[in-house]
């Protein structure tokens, strides 16, 4: 009997994630492939190490940038409002929905503004994905190549600053330093060629 209950719970969690992935992919296919899928994976790895509510972390990781593409409101605010509607339809509990909303609203805020482990994990995963997968993240920019390198550099720094788990930040630091120097070089080479 316990096995059936455990299996049902596991199945429900997996199905909820799959439904959210489909919703996000349909709305933002490029962002999903180049960024959100990595945020989701890193967030779940961090949840195994540092704890927190898995359903909240998975939903917030998948929906954190769902408000992108509309310029009348910050994407965090729009994403939070969309998340409320989506998660209600998927029968998430109200307290979990509010935790997801808080994670989405604070995913770009400075490290000290985050209080729960769920918020810290989602924003750290978002930042780490920006750093570790920066060449893919750079593809999302519609800018010219030279500008794009500067854009990638800016987002590398922003991504690294978002990582609020000290132990994890130390692990990402070597990637950050290496990628920063590669991108600096590519900007210099591009500028010397186009002079
Ligand atoms: Fe974002
Ligand atoms: Fe993001």
Image (cartoon, helix red, strand yellow):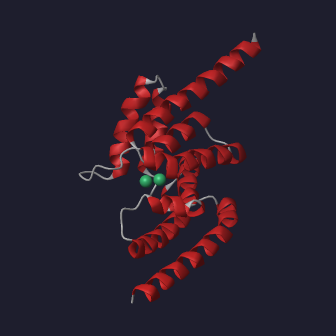
Residue 100 x/y as whole percent: 48, 39
Is residue 109 visible to the viewer in this orientation of the structure? Answer: no
Q: Nearer the viewer, residue 39 or 78?
A: 39
- Tell me if 107 is positioned left or right of 164 in this view: left
Residue at horizontal 45 percent and vertical 28 percent from the top? 94
Residue 190 x/y as whole percent: 46, 81
Quadrant into which the N terminus falls: top right
Is residue 18 visible to the viewer in this orientation of the structure? Answer: yes
Residue at horizontal 55 percent and vertical 66 percent from the top? 160
Q: Residue furthest left?
A: 72
Establish if 34 lies above or below 170.
above
Residue 161 x/y as whole percent: 53, 66
Q: Nearer the viewer, residue 93 or 23?
A: 23
Q: Nearer the viewer, residue 68 or 47?
A: 68
Quadrant into which the C terminus falls: bottom left
Residue at horizontal 56 percent and vertical 49 percent from the top? 39
């Amino acid at each position: 009997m316990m096995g059936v209950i455990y299996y049902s719970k596991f199945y429900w969690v997996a199905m909820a994630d799959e439904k959210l992935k489909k919703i996000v992919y349909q709305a933002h296919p490029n962002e999903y492939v180049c960024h959100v899928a990595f945020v989701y994976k890193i967030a779940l790895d961090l949840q195994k190490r540092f704890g927190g509510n898995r359903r909240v972390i998975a939903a917030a990781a998948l929906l954190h940038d769902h408000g992108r593409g509309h310029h009348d409101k910050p994407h965090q605010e729009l994403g939070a409002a969309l998340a409320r509607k989506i998660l209600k339809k998927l029968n998430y509990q109200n307290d979990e929905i509010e935790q997801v909303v808080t994670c989405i609203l604070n995913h770009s805020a400075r490290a000290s503004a985050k209080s729960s482990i769920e918020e810290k994990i989602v924003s750290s995963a978002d930042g780490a994905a920006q750093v570790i997968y920066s060449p893919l993240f750079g593809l999302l920019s519609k800018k010219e190549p030279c500008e794009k390198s500067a854009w990638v550099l800016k987002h590398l720094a922003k991504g690294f600053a978002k990582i609020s788990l000290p132990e994890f930040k130390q692990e990402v630091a070597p990637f950050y330093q290496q990628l920063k120097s590669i991108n600096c070089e590519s900007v210099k080479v591009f500028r010397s060629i186009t002079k």
